[in-house]
Image (cartoon, rainbow, N blue to C red):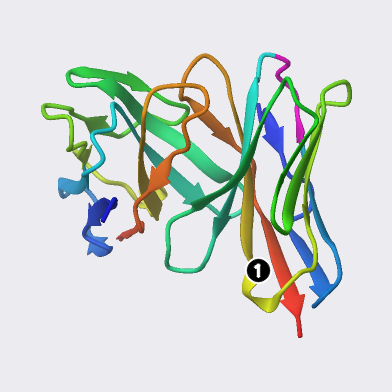
Amino acid sequence: DQQVKQNSPSLSVQEGRISILNCDYTNSMFDYFLWYKKYPAEGPTFLISISSIKDKNEDGRFTVFLNKSAKHLSLHIVPSQPGDSAVYFCAARFSGSRLTFGEGTQLTVNP
Amino acid sequence: EAQVTQNPRYLITVTGKKLTVTCSQNMNHEYMSWYRQDPGLGLRQIYYSMNVEVTDKGDVPEGYKVSRKEKRNFPLILESPSPNQTSLYFCASSFYGEKSEAFFGQGTRLTVV
């Protein structure tokens, strides 16, 4: 039972354009959502998060949007840079620190 | 430097030979956990610990054991490894709380032949 799903295994965009990574969840109890970025041969690193009481959180080039009614969140990266090429994991949690992750999306930003 | 350290980074072993992957964090985090990453399945939690001597099963605990005798260490034990445990393993730690981000180790690539 995959409670957090990232339906796009890969995404390719041109440098300078917007990257939009999507994530859907099924458990309405989730109240905090996070995005992690992972480079090859490294562990995931925290990127940005959003609480379920908000619908948008912005940090520099990264913005996360949450649509609770649709149980959908998205990560926007603008402008995209080649160094953003990585696997992006969406994660969700409730009742403390137990995180549930999606399958990941490989983002490739072409120069 | 705040970090989560896993060892070894790479390990090839044979079926049935017990092994331990160590994990240590220097951030005084209460919460620690182990994940495995497999293609198309993302990161799945194996075991977690909310504090010393408190551990619980995650989503895929079969074939694994853990212990939490000290706050900083959380080893993952495979008593009798099998080829289906070939995977990329990550240890993570965080403070306990809904807004706490998890810090990950660099990963252990395990191959069981």
Point out the image quarter for the C terminus of chain B: bottom left
Residue A23: image location, x then y, percent: 76, 41
Residues drawn in magenta: A24-28
Q: Position of residue B82 (x, y in %)?
A: 31, 47
Q: Is label 1 in a helix, a strand or a loop? A: helix
Position of A109 relative to A2 (above/below): below
Residue shown at 88%/26% (left/top)? Answer: A70
* Magenta-colored stretch includes residue A26: yes
Q: Residue furthest front?
A: A60
Q: Quadrant of residue B52?
A: top left
Residue sitting nearer the eye, A6 or B15? A6
Q: Residue at x 52, y 30 (%)?
A: A99
Q: Nearer the viewer, residue B95 or B14?
A: B95
Q: x, y (%) of residue A30?
A: 65, 20
Task: Using residue B94 as the reference point, say whether residue A27 is left or right of it.
Answer: right
Residue that label 1 marks: A84
Judge from the rendering whether residue B3 lies leftward or rightward of residue A108; answer left or right.
left
Label 1 chain ID = A
The number of callouts visible is 1
Q: Amino acid at mark 1?
A: Asp
Task: Give the percent coordinates (x, y) of residue B11.
Answer: 25, 63
Question: Relative to the observer, which residue lies in front, B95 or A6?
Answer: B95
State the image quarter where residue B72 is shown: top left
* Quarter of the N terminus of chain B within the rendering: bottom left
Q: Is residue B61 above or below residue B23?
A: above
Q: Is residue B27 magenta?
A: no
Q: Left or right: A71 with respect to B11?
A: right
Relative to B111, say whether B100 is above or below.
Answer: above
Rendered view: B31 above or below A27: below
Instruction: Answer left or right for A100 relative to B97.
Output: right
